[in-house]
Image: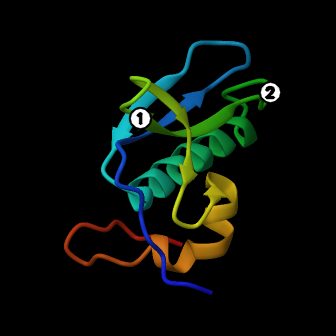
Amino acid sequence: MSEFKPTKQKLRVSHFPQIPCKPFSYEVKNEREAYILEDAITRQHLFLFKNGFIPDYANVFNVEVFNEEDNEWQDYFNEFHELEWDDLCQEFIADIVQPNPDTDLDLP
C-alpha cells in the first residue's frame, strides 16, 4: 500500500437527511474532517432512528471536491490514488483519521 496523499482541492460533505430533499453542505479542510463529520452525522441519525425521533432512515452522504476548471462541486475522486471516497476510506482509514490530541474529541 502506498502512502496516503490528500487532495489539494476544496472539500465539502453534503448530507441529504431524507430522500428526496436538498442537502445540507459543509466545507471541510481535508479528508480527515470529512470523515469525522460524516461519521458524526451518521451516528446522530442512528441515535434519532433507534430512539423513535425519526420514523425511517433514508439519508445519503456525498463527499465532494470543487473543480475549479468547471466551477462546480463534483463527487470526490482522489486523482493520485485513483479512488472514490468510499474506496479511499477503506484503503486508508488509519491514515485519514490520525489522532490529533490538540483538537480531537474521543473517536471510536
Q: Which of marks 1 and 2 precedes in the sequence? A: 2
- Relative horizontal placement of residue 29, taking residue 32 as reference (left or right): left
Q: Where does the image place residue 82, in percent across and percent down from the top left? A: 62, 61
Tell me if mark 2 has few (under 14), some (14-19) or many (20+) residues whose alpha carbon lies within 10 angstroms of its own. Answer: few
Instruction: Check the picture and name the quadrant holding the N terminus.
Output: bottom right
Identified at 74% across, 42% down, the residue is 50
Query: Which residue, given by chain and number where applicable, does mark 2 sit on?
Result: 56
Tell me if mark 1 has few (under 14), some (14-19) or many (20+) residues whose alpha carbon lies within 10 angstroms of its own. Answer: some
In front of the other: 93 or 87: 87
Q: Where does the image place residue 42, in percent across and percent down from the top left? A: 61, 46
Figure label count? 2
- Label 2 vs label 1, nearer the camera: 1
Q: Judging from the image, what secondary structure is the residue with disc 2 in?
A: loop
Residue type at numbered disc 1: Phe
Q: Judging from the image, what secondary structure is the residue with disc 1 in?
A: strand
Residue type at numbered disc 2: Asp
Q: Is residue 92 above or below residue 77?
A: below
Identified at 54% across, 32% down, the residue is 74
Instruction: Check the picture and name the quadrant holding the C terminus.
Output: bottom right
Do callouts 2 and 1 mark residues in contact (Cβ within 8 Å)?
A: no
Q: Where does the image place residue 80, in percent across and percent down from the top left? A: 51, 65
Query: Which residue, given by chain and number where applicable, does mark 1 sit on?
Result: 66
